Image (cartoon, rainbow, N blue to C red):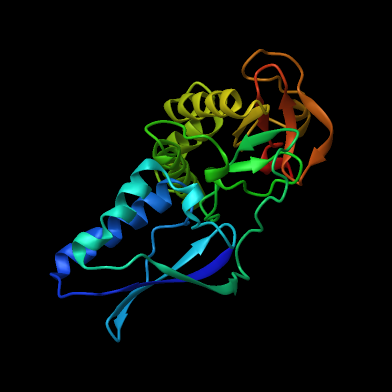
Protein backbone atom coordinates (compact mmCIF):
# COMPACT_ATOMS: atom_id res chain seq x y z
CA UNK A 1 0.00 0.00 0.00
CA UNK A 2 1.05 3.59 -0.58
CA UNK A 3 0.53 6.99 1.04
CA UNK A 4 -0.54 9.79 -1.30
CA UNK A 5 -1.12 13.52 -0.82
CA UNK A 6 -4.05 14.93 -2.79
CA UNK A 7 -4.29 18.70 -3.25
CA UNK A 8 -7.22 20.79 -4.50
CA UNK A 9 -6.61 24.48 -5.20
CA UNK A 10 -9.40 26.96 -4.43
CA UNK A 11 -9.77 29.21 -7.47
CA UNK A 12 -12.67 31.26 -6.11
CA UNK A 13 -14.44 32.02 -2.86
CA UNK A 14 -16.73 29.19 -1.89
CA UNK A 15 -18.83 28.15 1.06
CA UNK A 16 -17.29 25.58 3.36
CA UNK A 17 -20.18 23.14 3.09
CA UNK A 18 -19.89 23.14 -0.73
CA UNK A 19 -16.17 22.37 -0.57
CA UNK A 20 -16.69 19.64 2.03
CA UNK A 21 -19.51 18.09 0.03
CA UNK A 22 -17.54 18.05 -3.22
CA UNK A 23 -14.48 16.46 -1.63
CA UNK A 24 -16.47 13.87 0.31
CA UNK A 25 -18.36 12.83 -2.84
CA UNK A 26 -15.08 12.16 -4.58
CA UNK A 27 -13.54 10.42 -1.56
CA UNK A 28 -16.56 8.14 -1.16
CA UNK A 29 -16.46 7.29 -4.88
CA UNK A 30 -12.75 6.45 -4.62
CA UNK A 31 -13.39 4.31 -1.54
CA UNK A 32 -16.35 2.44 -3.02
CA UNK A 33 -14.22 1.60 -6.04
CA UNK A 34 -11.35 0.36 -3.88
CA UNK A 35 -9.05 3.18 -5.00
CA UNK A 36 -8.52 4.39 -1.44
CA UNK A 37 -8.63 2.24 1.68
CA UNK A 38 -10.27 2.92 5.02
CA UNK A 39 -12.54 5.68 6.26
CA UNK A 40 -10.00 8.01 7.84
CA UNK A 41 -9.42 11.19 5.88
CA UNK A 42 -6.78 13.57 7.31
CA UNK A 43 -7.61 16.94 5.74
CA UNK A 44 -6.12 20.42 6.09
CA UNK A 45 -6.19 23.81 4.36
CA UNK A 46 -2.98 25.70 3.68
CA UNK A 47 -2.15 28.62 1.39
CA UNK A 48 -5.46 28.49 -0.45
CA UNK A 49 -5.37 24.74 -1.02
CA UNK A 50 -7.26 21.85 0.49
CA UNK A 51 -5.10 18.79 1.14
CA UNK A 52 -5.94 15.14 1.84
CA UNK A 53 -3.77 12.18 2.79
CA UNK A 54 -4.99 8.76 1.65
CA UNK A 55 -3.82 5.15 1.59
CA UNK A 56 -4.05 3.42 -1.80
CA UNK A 57 -3.34 -0.13 -2.98
CA UNK A 58 -0.93 0.99 -5.73
CA UNK A 59 1.00 4.06 -6.77
CA UNK A 60 -1.44 4.83 -9.60
CA UNK A 61 -4.67 3.84 -7.84
CA UNK A 62 -6.17 7.32 -8.30
CA UNK A 63 -5.67 7.34 -12.07
CA UNK A 64 -8.90 8.35 -13.86
CA UNK A 65 -8.99 5.04 -15.78
CA UNK A 66 -10.06 3.30 -12.56
CA UNK A 67 -12.93 5.67 -11.77
CA UNK A 68 -16.48 4.45 -11.37
CA UNK A 69 -19.33 6.44 -12.96
CA UNK A 70 -19.90 8.05 -9.57
CA UNK A 71 -16.21 9.00 -9.40
CA UNK A 72 -16.28 10.59 -12.85
CA UNK A 73 -19.37 12.56 -11.88
CA UNK A 74 -17.80 13.72 -8.59
CA UNK A 75 -14.62 14.78 -10.38
CA UNK A 76 -16.61 16.78 -12.93
CA UNK A 77 -18.49 18.63 -10.17
CA UNK A 78 -15.43 19.93 -8.30
CA UNK A 79 -15.51 23.22 -10.20
CA UNK A 80 -19.01 23.92 -8.84
CA UNK A 81 -17.42 24.24 -5.37
CA UNK A 82 -14.52 26.36 -6.64
CA UNK A 83 -12.01 23.52 -6.63
CA UNK A 84 -9.49 22.57 -9.29
CA UNK A 85 -8.85 19.01 -10.38
CA UNK A 86 -6.72 17.15 -7.81
CA UNK A 87 -2.93 17.17 -7.89
CA UNK A 88 -1.51 13.90 -6.57
CA UNK A 89 1.88 13.37 -4.93
CA UNK A 90 3.27 9.98 -3.96
CA UNK A 91 4.75 10.06 -0.45
CA UNK A 92 5.98 6.47 -0.33
CA UNK A 93 5.08 2.94 0.71
CA UNK A 94 3.03 2.45 3.86
CA UNK A 95 5.35 0.26 5.92
CA UNK A 96 2.66 -1.21 8.18
CA UNK A 97 0.13 -2.37 5.58
CA UNK A 98 -0.23 -5.33 3.23
CA UNK A 99 1.52 -5.66 -0.11
CA UNK A 100 -0.85 -5.60 -3.07
CA UNK A 101 -1.04 -8.66 -5.32
CA UNK A 102 1.16 -8.29 -8.36
CA UNK A 103 -0.46 -11.04 -10.42
CA UNK A 104 -3.20 -9.59 -12.61
CA UNK A 105 -4.85 -12.99 -13.12
CA UNK A 106 -4.26 -15.45 -10.25
CA UNK A 107 -5.08 -19.11 -10.78
CA UNK A 108 -7.75 -18.73 -8.06
CA UNK A 109 -8.91 -16.12 -5.56
CA UNK A 110 -10.97 -15.85 -2.38
CA UNK A 111 -13.00 -13.47 -0.26
CA UNK A 112 -11.16 -13.16 3.05
CA UNK A 113 -11.28 -10.49 5.74
CA UNK A 114 -10.24 -9.84 9.34
CA UNK A 115 -10.92 -6.88 11.59
CA UNK A 116 -7.21 -5.97 11.66
CA UNK A 117 -6.69 -5.78 7.88
CA UNK A 118 -7.55 -2.53 6.13
CA UNK A 119 -7.35 -3.73 2.54
CA UNK A 120 -9.35 -5.33 -0.24
CA UNK A 121 -11.34 -8.42 0.84
CA UNK A 122 -10.52 -10.08 -2.48
CA UNK A 123 -7.27 -12.04 -2.16
CA UNK A 124 -5.08 -13.93 -4.58
CA UNK A 125 -5.30 -17.65 -3.93
CA UNK A 126 -1.68 -18.00 -5.05
CA UNK A 127 -0.20 -15.51 -2.56
CA UNK A 128 -3.06 -14.35 -0.27
CA UNK A 129 -2.12 -10.78 -1.22
CA UNK A 130 -5.06 -8.36 -1.59
CA UNK A 131 -6.32 -7.61 -5.11
CA UNK A 132 -7.44 -4.00 -5.71
CA UNK A 133 -11.17 -3.98 -6.35
CA UNK A 134 -10.84 -1.60 -9.28
CA UNK A 135 -9.17 -4.43 -11.19
CA UNK A 136 -12.51 -6.27 -11.06
CA UNK A 137 -15.63 -5.27 -13.01
CA UNK A 138 -18.19 -3.50 -10.84
CA UNK A 139 -20.22 -5.78 -8.57
CA UNK A 140 -23.39 -3.67 -8.80
CA UNK A 141 -24.46 -0.09 -9.53
CA UNK A 142 -21.13 0.79 -11.12
CA UNK A 143 -18.83 0.13 -8.14
CA UNK A 144 -18.04 -2.18 -5.19
CA UNK A 145 -19.96 -0.42 -2.44
CA UNK A 146 -22.13 -3.45 -1.58
CA UNK A 147 -19.08 -5.72 -1.31
CA UNK A 148 -17.39 -3.24 1.04
CA UNK A 149 -20.53 -3.14 3.19
CA UNK A 150 -20.31 -6.91 3.48
CA UNK A 151 -16.64 -6.54 4.49
CA UNK A 152 -17.61 -4.00 7.17
CA UNK A 153 -20.15 -6.46 8.59
CA UNK A 154 -17.59 -9.30 8.51
CA UNK A 155 -15.03 -7.17 10.35
CA UNK A 156 -17.63 -6.15 12.95
CA UNK A 157 -18.46 -9.81 13.65
CA UNK A 158 -14.76 -10.67 13.83
CA UNK A 159 -14.21 -7.86 16.34
CA UNK A 160 -17.08 -9.12 18.50
CA UNK A 161 -15.82 -12.70 18.60
CA UNK A 162 -12.26 -11.59 19.33
CA UNK A 163 -13.48 -9.44 22.22
CA UNK A 164 -15.37 -12.38 23.73
CA UNK A 165 -18.51 -10.34 24.45
CA UNK A 166 -21.99 -11.78 24.96
CA UNK A 167 -22.61 -11.69 21.20
CA UNK A 168 -19.56 -13.91 20.52
CA UNK A 169 -21.50 -17.05 19.59
CA UNK A 170 -23.84 -15.18 17.27
CA UNK A 171 -20.84 -13.56 15.58
CA UNK A 172 -19.10 -16.94 15.16
CA UNK A 173 -22.25 -18.36 13.57
CA UNK A 174 -22.21 -15.54 11.02
CA UNK A 175 -18.51 -16.03 10.25
CA UNK A 176 -18.43 -19.82 10.04
CA UNK A 177 -21.73 -20.85 8.44
CA UNK A 178 -22.13 -20.44 4.67
CA UNK A 179 -25.91 -20.43 5.22
CA UNK A 180 -25.88 -17.53 7.71
CA UNK A 181 -27.04 -14.14 6.40
CA UNK A 182 -23.43 -12.94 6.26
CA UNK A 183 -22.27 -16.21 4.70
CA UNK A 184 -24.97 -16.20 2.02
CA UNK A 185 -24.08 -12.66 1.03
CA UNK A 186 -20.39 -13.51 0.88
CA UNK A 187 -20.97 -16.64 -1.19
CA UNK A 188 -23.18 -14.69 -3.58
CA UNK A 189 -20.46 -12.07 -4.00
CA UNK A 190 -17.86 -14.78 -4.63
CA UNK A 191 -20.07 -16.30 -7.33
CA UNK A 192 -20.60 -12.88 -8.90
CA UNK A 193 -16.87 -12.12 -8.92
CA UNK A 194 -16.13 -15.53 -10.43
CA UNK A 195 -18.65 -14.83 -13.20
CA UNK A 196 -17.18 -11.38 -13.89
CA UNK A 197 -13.53 -12.43 -13.82
CA UNK A 198 -13.76 -16.04 -15.00
CA UNK A 199 -11.36 -16.91 -12.15
CA UNK A 200 -12.37 -19.56 -9.57
CA UNK A 201 -13.42 -17.57 -6.50
CA UNK A 202 -13.84 -19.09 -3.04
CA UNK A 203 -15.42 -17.92 0.21
CA UNK A 204 -13.48 -18.18 3.49
CA UNK A 205 -15.23 -19.62 6.56
CA UNK A 206 -13.74 -18.74 9.95
CA UNK A 207 -13.50 -21.75 12.25
CA UNK A 208 -13.10 -21.95 16.02
CA UNK A 209 -14.38 -24.53 18.52
CA UNK A 210 -14.97 -28.20 17.74
CA UNK A 211 -15.01 -31.38 19.83
CA UNK A 212 -11.44 -32.61 19.32
CA UNK A 213 -8.44 -32.32 17.03
CA UNK A 214 -9.29 -35.63 15.36
CA UNK A 215 -12.88 -34.59 14.76
CA UNK A 216 -11.69 -31.28 13.33
CA UNK A 217 -9.24 -32.94 10.98
CA UNK A 218 -12.02 -35.07 9.52
CA UNK A 219 -14.90 -32.59 9.49
CA UNK A 220 -16.60 -32.54 6.07
CA UNK A 221 -17.35 -29.60 3.82
CA UNK A 222 -20.44 -27.82 5.22
CA UNK A 223 -21.73 -27.34 1.70
CA UNK A 224 -21.68 -30.84 0.20
CA UNK A 225 -20.65 -33.06 3.12
CA UNK A 226 -17.61 -34.43 1.27
CA UNK A 227 -13.97 -34.59 2.51
CA UNK A 228 -12.11 -31.33 1.87
CA UNK A 229 -9.00 -31.46 4.08
CA UNK A 230 -5.83 -30.39 2.26
CA UNK A 231 -2.61 -32.37 2.46
CA UNK A 232 -0.72 -29.17 3.35
CA UNK A 233 -1.84 -25.86 4.83
CA UNK A 234 -1.94 -22.94 2.38
CA UNK A 235 -0.56 -19.54 3.44
CA UNK A 236 -0.56 -20.64 7.10
CA UNK A 237 -4.36 -20.34 7.21
CA UNK A 238 -6.23 -22.55 4.74
CA UNK A 239 -6.52 -26.20 5.82
CA UNK A 240 -9.74 -27.06 3.97
CA UNK A 241 -10.76 -26.39 0.37
CA UNK A 242 -13.79 -27.62 -1.58
CA UNK A 243 -13.55 -27.05 -5.31
CA UNK A 244 -17.19 -27.94 -5.86
CA UNK A 245 -18.69 -25.60 -3.26
CA UNK A 246 -15.96 -22.95 -3.63
CA UNK A 247 -15.38 -22.87 0.14
CA UNK A 248 -12.16 -22.69 2.17
CA UNK A 249 -11.57 -22.74 5.92
CA UNK A 250 -8.98 -23.15 8.66
CA UNK A 251 -8.41 -25.92 11.18
CA UNK A 252 -10.15 -24.73 14.34
CA UNK A 253 -7.95 -22.21 16.10
CA UNK A 254 -8.65 -24.13 19.33
CA UNK A 255 -6.45 -26.97 18.10
CA UNK A 256 -3.56 -25.07 16.52
Quadrant position of the C terminus in the picture: top right
- Identified at 67% across, 35% down, the residue is 109
Give left or right: position of 78 versus 238. left
181 or 96, nearer to the observer: 96
Is residue 97 shown above or below 125?
below
249 or 135, nearer to the observer: 135
Can residue 250 be seen in the rendering of this structure?
Answer: yes
- Identified at 43% across, 34% down, the residue is 170
Can residue 121 be seen in the rendering of this structure?
Answer: no
- Identified at 81% across, 30% down, the residue is 230
25 or 252, nearer to the observer: 25
Quarter of the image for residue 220 reads top right
Q: Position of residue 229 (x, y in %)?
A: 78, 27
Give left or right: position of 157 versus 29. right
- Identified at 56% across, 23% down, the residue is 191
Is residue 213 shown above or below 224?
below
Q: Position of residue 35 (x, y in %)?
A: 48, 53
Give left or right: position of 65 versus 10. right
Amino acid sequence: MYLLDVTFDLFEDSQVHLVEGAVMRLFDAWRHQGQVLGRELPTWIRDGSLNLRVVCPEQDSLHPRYLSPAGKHALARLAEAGLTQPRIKLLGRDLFSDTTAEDQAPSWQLLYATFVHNCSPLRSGDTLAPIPLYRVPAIANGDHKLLLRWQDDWMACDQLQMNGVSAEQAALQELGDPKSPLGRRGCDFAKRIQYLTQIPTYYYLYRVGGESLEAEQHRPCPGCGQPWRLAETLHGIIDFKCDDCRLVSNLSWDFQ
